[in-house]
Image (spheres, rainbow, N blue to C red):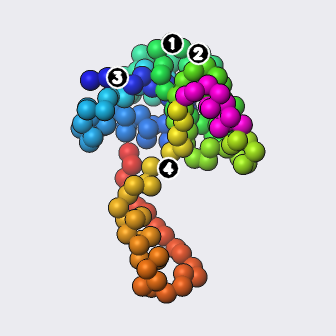
Amino acid sequence: MQEVRIGLIGTGFMGKAHATAYKNVPAVFGTELGVPVLTMLADIDEATIERNANSFGIPRWTTDWHDLINDPEVDVVDITTPNHLHAEMAIAAAQAGKHVYCEKPLALSAPEAKTIVDAVEAAGVISMVGFNYLKNPIQGFAKEIIESGEIGEITLVRGQFDQDIL
């Protein structure tokens, strides 16, 4: 069983959701492809990060995200910070040789996203944006119905998704 050592930047709502998900990976998906291990947290608010680190049993944390990105015990940097910080952090992580998992949106503009892609390609690392429902069967089913023309021309779409993610 290979461990994938993850450093999580941002421990607010989405960061807590990611931390919870990582802890549940073995039970949901098994261990054949590896096991994510949350090794370090970063957040700008010391009280928040200390509380969340204790809550998730993560002994290593920092209030400076640069420390996490440059830590040799981190393989993947997971970015769940406010949107305007994604590009700077993703580029720095790639340049440090870390794989990058970034919550949506990847960037604030297409040119900014391109700078991230360029940094990732130059570093030879893997990156992914958190579009976590791409393989959900209901999306595929909806696509089939729409493409078949079975329901006619689509002029308006309204959706609702209720899920207890925590």
What secondary structure is the magenta-colored segment mainly? helix
Q: Secondary structure at mark 4?
A: loop
- Label 3 near label 2: C-beta < 8 Å? no
Q: How many marks?
A: 4
- Label 1 near label 2: C-beta < 8 Å? yes
Residue 118 among magenta residues: yes
Tell me the kind of residue under disc 3: Glu
Tell me the kind of residue under disc 2: Asn
Q: Which residue is label 4 attached to? A: 131
Q: Eyeballing the image, is 52 above or below 25?
A: above
Residue 72 among magenta residues: no
Q: Position of residue 139 (x, y in %)?
A: 42, 64
Q: Which residue is label 1 attached to? A: 72
Tell me the kind of residue under disc 4: Phe
Quarter holding residue 88: top right
* Segment colored magenta: 115-125
Within 10 Å of disc 2 (Cα), the crowding (few <14, some 14-19, many 20+) is some
Q: Eyeballing the image, is 132 above or below 72?
A: below
Q: Identify the mark at residue 3; answer none if there is no mark.
A: 3
Q: Position of residue 63 (x, y in %)?
A: 60, 20
Q: Which residue is label 2 attached to? A: 70
Within 10 Å of disc 4 (Cα), the crowding (few <14, some 14-19, many 20+) is few
Residue found 72% across the figure and 48% down from its top: 110
Spatial separation of the CA atoms under disc 2 and disc 3: 19 Å
Residue found 58% across the figure and 15% down from its top: 70
Q: Position of residue 47 (x, y in %)?
A: 54, 24
Q: Identify the mark at residue 152; answer none if there is no mark.
A: none
The mark that comes first in sequence, 2 or 3, is 3
- Label 1 near label 3: C-beta < 8 Å? no
Tell me the kind of residue under disc 1: Pro
